[in-house]
Amino acid sequence: MKFFGSISSFLTILNESMRLLPKNGKLMALIAIISVFLSLCFSFLFSYSLQSVVAHMLVSMQQSFLPDPTTFNMPDTPDPNSPTYNTGFNPFQFIGPPALRGDFAILFAVEFTFLLAISIISFFSSISTILVSAVSHTSKNLSLNELFSTILKTCTKPLITTLYVSCLSTGYFVSVITLLVPLLMCPNRAALWVACLVGITACIFYLYLVVPWIVSIVVSVVEESCYGLEALGKGAALVKGKRLHGFLVNVFFNLVFLILSLGYMTILGKNLSPSVSLMLLAAAIPLGKIVQMVAYTVFYFQCKELHGEEIELPGSVHYTKLLITQLPNDMP
C-alpha cells in the first residue's frame, strides 16, 4: 500500500508541475528560449572548434611520425652526444612532439570551456525555474525585473550548495569507478557481467541518493540564509517520509530521456552527423532540466506541507512566509 501511495503522490507531483508551467508562462518560456539558444550556440562553437583541433592534430601527427614525402627522410633523432641532449625523464615525451602536445592542451581547453559554459547555463536556468515555480505555487505574479534582481541577490547561496552537491556526486562516481576497474580488467565474461550489474545498480541507487541533494538546491534558492551544509541537512530532513516520491521523479525523467535517446538513435541517429546530434541534445537537455526543476519545486512544497513548515519567498519577490498546517480530514 505504501508503494501505491508513493505512485499516487508521484502522479500528483507531475500533475501539479504541468499545471504550474503556464503560470508566469512568459517567464518560463523566456527561460527555456534563452537556455536552449545559449546551449545551441556553445554546442555549435564546440563542434566547430573540436573539428578544427582534431584536423590540426592529424596533420601534426602525420608531420611528426611519418617521413617527409618529398625527401623520404625520417625526422631527425636527437644526438646523445649533443650538449642540448636531455637525459632526464620528461613525462610529456609519450604524448608526442611539442606541436602535438600543444594540440592536446587546446583540445582540453576547448572541452573544459564547453563543459563550464553548459554548467553555468544549467545553473542559472535551474535557479530561475525554481524562483518562478515557487512564486507561481503561491499564486503570485513575477516581473522580469524582479526575477533578474532576485537571481543576482540569491545566486551565491545555490552556487555554494551546488558545489557541495557536485563534490558529493563526484566522490560517489569515483568510488564506483574504483570498484569497477578491477572487474573490467578481468578477462573472463562473468566479471564483465558483474561489472555491468554493479554499474546499473550504482546508477539506480544514485537516483535515490541524490533526492535530498536536489531538494537542498531548491532550499538554497527559496529559503533565506540557508545554503551549503545547512541546506544539505535541511534537504535530508525534508525528504524524510517522501524520499521514494523524489526517487520516482528521477526515474521518470531518466526513463523518458533514455526512451527518447534510443528512439532517436534508431530512427535518425544513422542519418545525421554527430554535430547535428550534439545540437539536438543541447536543445533537449535544458528543456528537460526545466521541467525536472519545476517538479522538484512542487516536491519541495509537498515536503514542507508534510512537516507543517512555512513557505518562504526570497529576496525582492514579495518576501512572504505562509504557515502551512494540515487540516483534519473531518473538517468541512
Image (cartoon, rainbow, N blue to C red):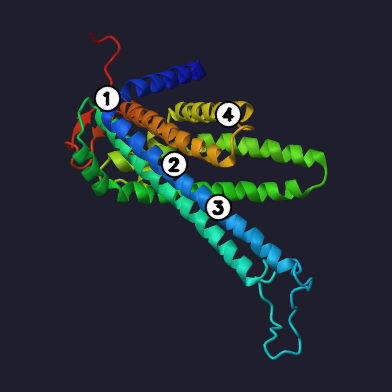
Could you say where residue 22 lies in the image, as x and y percent from the top left? Answer: 30, 23
Callouts 4 and 1 close, C-beta under 8 Å? no
The residue positioned 43% from the left and 35% from the top of the image is 289
Could you say where residue 247 lies in the image, as x and y percent from the top left? Answer: 49, 30
Callouts 2 and 1 close, C-beta under 8 Å? no
Of 192 and 44, the residue lying toward us: 44
Label 3 vs label 1: CA separation?
Answer: 40 Å
Left or right position of 158 against 319: right
Of 259 and 245, the residue lying toward us: 259
To which residue does mark 2 refer? 40
What amino acid type is highlighted by mark number 4? Tyr
Q: Earlier in the sequence, mark 3 or mark 1?
A: 1
Q: Which mark is residue 23?
A: 1
Label 2 vs label 1: CA separation?
Answer: 26 Å
Left or right position of 99 against 160: right
Is there any visible trace of residue 228 in the rendered image? no
The residue positioned 76% from the left and 86% from the top of the image is 80
Q: Earlier in the sequence, mark 2 or mark 3?
A: 2
Q: Earlier in the sequence, mark 3 or mark 4?
A: 3
To which residue does mark 4 refer? 264
Left or right position of 72 against 83: right
